[in-house]
Image (tube, rainbow, N blue to C red):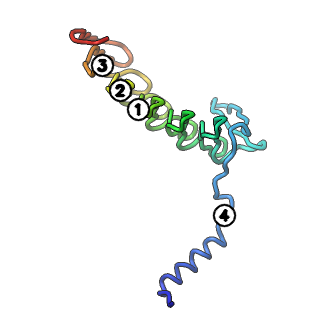
Amino acid sequence: MKLPLTIIVMLLLLQNCNQHSDPTSSINIVSTSELSFEKNEKGTAIAYHNDSPFSGKAISKYKNGQSFTEKNYQKGIQEGAWLIYYENGNRMKSGVVKNGQKEGNSYEWYESGQKKYEQPYHNNQKHGKWLSWYTNGVKWTERDFENDVLNGKVLVWDSLGTLTKEYTYQKGEMVDKQFYFENTNE
């Protein structure tokens, strides 16, 4: 059987790339128990493995072998996605860290798998619309944060989805509140 020239060239290129690949580019995976931590001058925790700042993935497991935590590090500083699991294998919490600080959305789930919280961060501060849900999936709360301070509406619903409370904040100070208790089940 004859192979087309383009396939032969591609195979040769792949073989050449594999021969010159950088062995340090593979992900280093260790148990979290193998790491030690020290705070730097900025108060950021630095992970060390064998007396050197750690780069790679640190994992911990439950006694049943199921993953408990997964965190990524770059030169000792937590960087990238992180996950925490329930013992049944469902996600408990997840988020992203950049340069050791929370960035983007963090999530939390009930053990059943139902989403519990969605919490956006920017530069390690609460920033954006924080949401929460009851175990039945009905929205529980909605809060607006700006640079770690409540700014805007805080809305609270009962477990059937009826709006029961509404607060208005400006730069962390409550400026208005409304309570709606008719027809609530709480």
**Residue contact between numbered discs 1 and 4, judged by CB atoms under 8 Å:** no
At label 4, the amino acid type is: Asp
Q: Nearer the viewer, mark 1 or mark 4?
A: 1
**Residue contact between numbered discs 1 and 2, judged by CB atoms under 8 Å:** yes
At label 1, the amino acid type is: Gln
Disc 1 target residue: 114
Furthest-bottom residue in this view: 2
> Which residue is depicted at the point 61% across and 72% down?
17
Q: Callout 1: 10 Å neighbours few (<14), some, many (20+)?
A: some
Q: Nearer the viewer, mark 3 or mark 4?
A: 3
Give the alpha-carbon distance from disc 3 to disc 4, as whole Å. 54 Å
* Whether residue 31 is visible: yes
Disc 3 target residue: 157
For marks 1 and 2 on the same chain, the one whose residue lies earlier in the sequence: 1
> Which residue is depicted at the point 32% across and 26% down?
138
For marks 1 and 4 on the same chain, the one whose residue lies earlier in the sequence: 4
Q: 134 and 23: which one is in front? A: 134
Disc 2 target residue: 136
Disc 4 target residue: 22
Give the alpha-carbon distance from disc 1 to disc 2, as whole Å. 8 Å
Q: Callout 3: 10 Å neighbours few (<14), some, many (20+)?
A: many
Q: 107 and 170: which one is in front? A: 107
How many numbered discs?
Answer: 4
Q: Relative to 64, does residue 24 appear above or below in the rendering?
A: below
Kindly state the secondary structure of the residue where label 4 is placed.
loop
Give the alpha-carbon distance from disc 3 to disc 2, as whole Å. 13 Å
Give the alpha-carbon distance from disc 1 to disc 4, as whole Å. 42 Å
